Image (cartoon, rainbow, N blue to C red):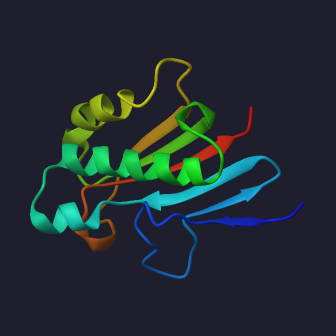
Amino acid sequence: MKKQIIFTPNAPAPIGPYSQAIKIDGRVYVSGQIAADLAASGAGVAEEARQVMISIGEILHAAGMNYHNIVKTSIFLKDMNDFTVINGIYGEFFSGDYPARETVQVSRLPKDVSVEISVIAMED
């Protein structure tokens, strides 16, 4: 049971003492991803969500996986009124057999972003 650190320059580098993802026993645990640069530029929640999902895809690719391998997603929103928008963007990255998921509103997210998403993926 060897732990493998997953890192790709194609996704944001961690902003603290954590890894983009950890792979162990055929599972990948992807840390919460944010789109800090987009949030700082005033981009909307849809742009943030799309970039977060793209970053997750890049991290999964670095681990030899893709969106199909996701079994669990956690979505953290600054404003639950953005749920419909986020749900639409999120759905663009799947073609059925959706992962389990929860979506919660939180009082604040790192770098004052509007959305943070983490996932767990498993090898086929």
In the figure, is residue 46 to the left or right of 42?
right
Residue name at image x 35 percent, y 28 percent: 92
User: Is 17 located above or below residue 103 in the figure?
Assistant: below
Q: Is residue 14 above or below residue 75?
A: below
Does residue 12 appear anywhere in the picture? yes
Q: Is residue 76 visible?
A: no
Measured as percent of width and height from the top left, residue 17 is found at: 55, 82
Q: Residue furthest top?
A: 96
Task: Work out whether residue 12 or residue 114 is closer to the camera in this orientation and state it.
Answer: 12
Q: Quadrant of residue 4?
A: bottom right
Residue, x 28% and y 72% (percent of image)?
Answer: 111
Outermost residue on the bottom side: it is 17
For this orientation, the residue located farthest to the left is 42
Please state the horizontal and vertical placement of residue 2, each as a whole percent of the image.
86, 64
Residue occupying image coordinates x 47% and y 59% = 32
Say if 112 sits above or below 43 in the image. below
